[in-house]
Amino acid sequence: MFWLIIMHFVQINCILSSQTYLSFNVLAHYKTVKSCYAIKDIGIWDKLIMLARNIPFSAKDYGILRSMGNATKHIVAAFHLAGEPGRRKLEGFLRYMAENRLDWQLQFVRIREDFNAEFVKSFAERGIDGVVYSLPAAKDGAAELDRLSLPTIALDIFDDAILCGRRRNLVYIASSCEDIGREAARHFLSQGLYRSYAFVPDLAGHTWSRLRGEAFVDEIRKNGFKVAMYKTRGKGYDLPKLRTWLEKLPRPAGVFAAFDDRAIQVLEACRDASLDVPHEIAVIGVDNDEALCPHTTPPLTSIQPDHAQIGRLAAEKLKEMLDGRRLETPERILVGVKRVEVRESTIPVTPSGRLVQRALAYIRAHYAEPLRPRDVVRELKVSRRLADLRFSEIQGESIGRAILRTRLEAVCRRLMTTNDTMENIAASCGFPKLDRLRAAFFAHYGCSLQEYRSRNV
């Protein structure tokens, strides 16, 4: 007796262009349940190809296939596959299909020109049961999709104008921009090595870029630092402007770029300006594109959102709706960060770095008190000479200077965000006498306390 367990039957129609179609069937089978994932470590595409080779079927087996075919669901899968995020989403989507033995016929749309209004209008006559939409640039097709009520999953759509009129049977699934920005900040802060921090957005001013930057700024500011924001002026070549801006940052600086391609431009600008990465400028990107990040100079540290989980959730939520669940209002799901892939574009945390981290954390917690360098050294439980040496090597300043800088930064925050008197600000930021604060502030910023408040409020 032939022990054949049919796991799933998938027919995939890939639209490669407006006129070209590629169709192939995958008949996934295993002789025992135990062997179902004997080849689980290979890539999804390789797995599908291997399973399609010369499988002998009995008449009973073909009967099972025919019965499965009666329940086939027709799904349009509009994925942007040119980059790593789209491919990971697709892999997660297909894995969920395989694990749950879903009999779905997929029609892929890979470019925005193919996901047009005319194409969407044809869904009814072609018997489309559901849509996975991840092509935000295909706005005319999305406008037509807005008028339909068939089950729809929208992936990483941050434009409020897309599907804005749609209420029923719609699920939004996206990477959490807030988690991405916070993770970038925490990575830099955990190193405790930087005198300044900066954010470089994408050139087009997308919403996801803005949200990542805002979360980065918020997390850095919570820890008592300011963030320099690079100002873009639309699309176009901006490397000379970026290079000049990077040269002005107090160093060492931690620079967060909105995504990997932009981070690579930051690396190029640093190279043109002869800025050492990571010792003068450290750089983090987003997406962890394996085709790019390990091969830049130096290799790029990158945050990897959990794109595969987004794909899995897309398949899971689509299945729920195809099985009868009805949504009267859109459901929104945010997916967090999978990991930070640390490479040479950020400085690894050394024992010396950890010592400085501890010192800075202690200073930030106690700067409002009568704190002196010897108090910090006592907390570190090392010699004053060693503490000063490590601070000079990594921060480029003495412990006393770090205490003063932290207090002055706190004064700046109070000047910008409160109406407190100068006397109250001085007392709350570690300056027992206002005259001492005035002298230190003018020496550092070149203006008076009142002038600074007038300029920045």
Image: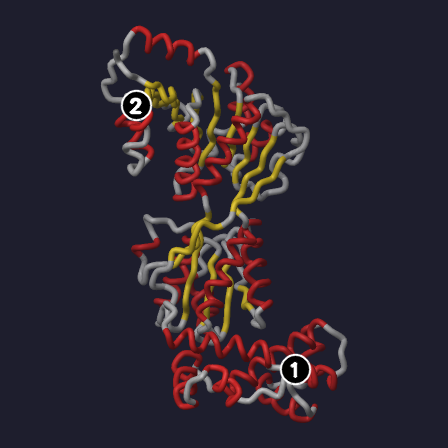
Give the residue furthest to the top: 59
Whichever of callouts 2 and 1 sits on the residue coming sooner in the sequence is 2
Residue 315 location in percent, x, y? 48, 31
- The residue labelled by disc 2 is 32
Along the line of sight, the residue nearer the viewer: 339 or 137: 339
**Residue 248 visible in the shown view:** no
Residue 301 location in percent, x, y? 38, 59
Mark 2: amino acid: Thr
Judge whether 89 appears above or below 202 on screen.
Answer: above
Count of labels in the image? 2
Residue 146, quarter of picture: top right
Along the line of sight, the residue nearer the viewer: 24 or 46: 46
Residue 236 location in percent, x, y? 47, 54
- Dot 1 surroundings within 10 Å: few (below 14), some, or many (20 or more)? many
Mark 1: amino acid: Cys
Q: Quadrant of the C terminus?
A: bottom right
- The residue labelled by disc 1 is 429
| Residue 54 relative to residue 362: left or right | left
Q: Is mark 2 on a helix, strand or loop?
A: loop
Say which residue appears at 47% left-offset and 14% top-offset: 71
- Dot 2 surroundings within 10 Å: few (below 14), some, or many (20 or more)? few
